Amino acid sequence: MSRAFLSSFQPVVGLALALAILGGWIALHGFALLAFDLSWETLPLALGMVAVLCWLSVGLFIVSHDAMHGSLVPGAPRLNTAIGTALLFLYAGFSYDKLRAAHWEHHKAPGTDRDPDFAADHPRAFWPWYATFLRCYFGLGSFFYVTAIFWVLHFALEVSIVQAMVFYAVPSIASSLQLFYFGTFRPHRHGEDTFVDRHNARSDNFGTLASFVTCYHFGYHLEHHHHPHVPWWALPDARREARAQPIEEGAGA
């Protein structure tokens, strides 16, 4: 993908994909919660819907992440903020300003004790690190928001508790695990291999389809740190460019 194309069509592509993800998230939640007959016979289909809902929830966060970097709609900070704020609130009642500030701290000192996304005491342990991650981002506001949505579904819309658990609570929790595992733990965990530069990040060797399905290409994480202005859907091209011509130390934010 040429830089000219990215510059000219980035807002159109970014907004179109954001609308598709949001539209799919709303439509599938509506069907699953209000129209789907959940039973033992329909359980296999229900599990497939839960997986898609989880993936679409991850998409809401990834679009908001692009907004934080100004790569959703370049040159339109107010629009980026408005979209990111709305999507993160829908996702789990998160504060966009708080997450954006923490995310830029992450980019300043990734994989260090100054990185809010990193567990310096547990650089290889998934669950302790995940607990640290949740404590940092999932505050009382998010707890009250999620709880309120759950009970509104049950009492106002007469959704059964089981149906609300399966199609609202489970995808929300699963998406946080998916985001953490592919977007934070795998790229920044300490292991036998060494990091190539100060970004303390690595990229997955997944193919384009697997990268898209797992975390909207966020597994190409070193490329993201080198080029934080590149939107999620253009990261495969950044990955190919990096393989063809290694990026110099110190590039990016």
Image (cartoon, rainbow, N blue to C red):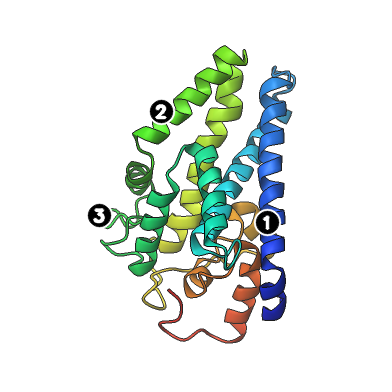
Is 168 displayed left or right of 31 in the figure? left
The quadrant holding residue 94 is top left
**Quadrant of the rendering where the C terminus is positioned:** bottom left
Is disc 1 placed on a helix, strand or loop? helix
Q: Quickly name the residue at label 3.
A: 121
Name the front one of labels 3 and 1. Answer: 1
Q: Are marks 3 and 1 in contact (CB under 8 Å)?
A: no
90 shown above or below 180: above
Residue ID at (49%, 59%): 68
> Could you tell me residue 207's position as x and y percent?
66, 65
Pick whichever, 123 or 227, lies toward us.
227
State which tag comes first along the sequence, 3 or 2.
3
Q: Is residue 110 above or below residue 88?
A: below
Query: Mark 3 to mark 2: distance in Å?
Result: 29 Å
Q: Residue at x 34, y 51 (%)?
A: 125
Above or below 95: residue 170: above
Given residues 124 and 55, the one toward you in this image is 55
For marks 2 and 1, the one nearer the N-term is 1
Q: Amino acid at mark 1?
A: Leu
Q: Residue at x 57, y 29 (%)?
A: 168
Identify the residue under disc 1: 15
